[in-house]
């Protein structure tokens, strides 16, 4: 078995790898929002910081879909509707600013796909739980009903264990508060 360093060196030394890496670098650095950020922070940044921050800037570009061009929140194309990330300088590194407070509205009203539940919602909840960030939920469902909702995908698959994992994260982040009263939308 070859040592992993040999394999990595072979990959890095390929001519097309270097060309693709340089094309990706140029694409990141030519993004208008990244260019503005780099210009605004030019006195804080050096070339090494920019090179180390390329992946964070790439993450920023992937998450940012120009919310100023969205006609409404419902038509927002971002993974988390209405979320527009920000680049920040932290010490000697470029980072994507974390949202200090997150509100997940009407949880349980959406159709459940395995990808949405496990890769999107589960990942967001895990991160917020580990970082101890405040997260608020609203739902017309109690915990038991929400777990049932998350158990069944829109294809009819029953995935109790995966739903339970997401619910454990929700329970660790939330204290249920039942709110009763007149529906103000019917006025």
Image (cartoon, rainbow, N blue to C red):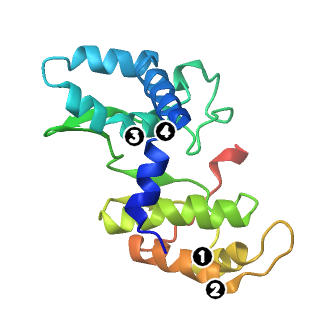
Q: Which residue is drawn at 47% across and 58% down?
A: 7
Q: What residue lies at 64% left-to-right and 74% top-to-bottom?
A: 146
The answer to whether residue 165 is above or below residue 88 is: below
Location of residue 16 with respect to 133 vertically, above or below: above
Disc tally is: 4
Q: Mark 4 against mark 3, which lies toward the viewer?
A: 3
Position of residue 125 measured from the top left corner of the image (x, y, whole percent): 46, 64
Residue depicted at 64% across the width and 65% down the height? 117
Q: Which quadrant would residue 32 be assigned to in this image?
A: top left
Q: In this view, does 171 lie to the left or right of 36?
A: right
Could you give the CA–CA distance between mark 1 and mark 2, rounded to whole angstroms? 18 Å
Q: What element carries label 3?
A: helix
Q: Mark 1 points at which residue?
A: 142
Quarter of the rendering containing residue 72: top right
Q: Which of 132 and 19 is in front in this view?
A: 19
Q: Where is residue 50 in the image (x, y as percent from the top left)?
A: 27, 29
Find disc 3 in the rendering and name its residue: 55
Task: Return the disc, 2 or 4, that comes first in the chain's sequence.
Answer: 4
Mark 3: few/some/many CA within 10 Å (<14, 14-19, 20+)? some
Q: What element carries label 4?
A: loop
Is the residue under label 4 in contact with that under label 1 (CB below 8 Å)? Answer: no
Mark number, residue 161: 2
Q: Which residue lies furthest to the bottom in this view?
A: 161
Q: Calculate the distance from the C-alpha at mark 4 to the C-alpha at mark 3.
A: 19 Å
- Residue at image position (32%, 49%) is 100
Q: Where is residue 118 in the image (x, y as percent from the top left)?
A: 61, 67
Residue tagged 4: 83
Q: How far apart are marks 3 and 2 (CA)?
A: 33 Å
95 with respect to 4 (left or right)? left
């Amino acid at each position: 078995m070859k040592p992993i360093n040999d394999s990595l060196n072979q990959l890095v030394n390929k001519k097309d790898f270097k060309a693709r890496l340089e094309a990706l670098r140029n694409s990141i650095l030519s993004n208008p929002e990244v260019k503005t950020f780099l210009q605004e922070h030019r006195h804080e940044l050096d070339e090494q910081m920019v090179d180390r921050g390329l992946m964070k800037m790439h993450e920023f570009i992937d998450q940012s879909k120009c919310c100023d061009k969205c006609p409404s929140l419902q038509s927002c194309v971002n993974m988390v509707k209405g979320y527009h990330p920000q680049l920040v300088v932290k010490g000697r590194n470029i980072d994507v600013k974390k949202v200090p407070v997150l509100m997940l509205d009407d949880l349980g009203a959406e159709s459940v796909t395995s990808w949405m539940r496990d890769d999107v919602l589960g990942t967001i909840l895990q991160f917020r739980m580990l970082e101890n960030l405040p997260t608020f939920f609203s739902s017309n469902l109690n915990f038991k009903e929400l777990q049932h909702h998350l158990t069944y995908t829109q294809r009819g698959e029953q995935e109790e264990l995966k739903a339970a994992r997401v619910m454990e994260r929700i329970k660790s982040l939330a204290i249920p508060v039942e709110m009763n009263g007149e529906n103000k939308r019917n006025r």
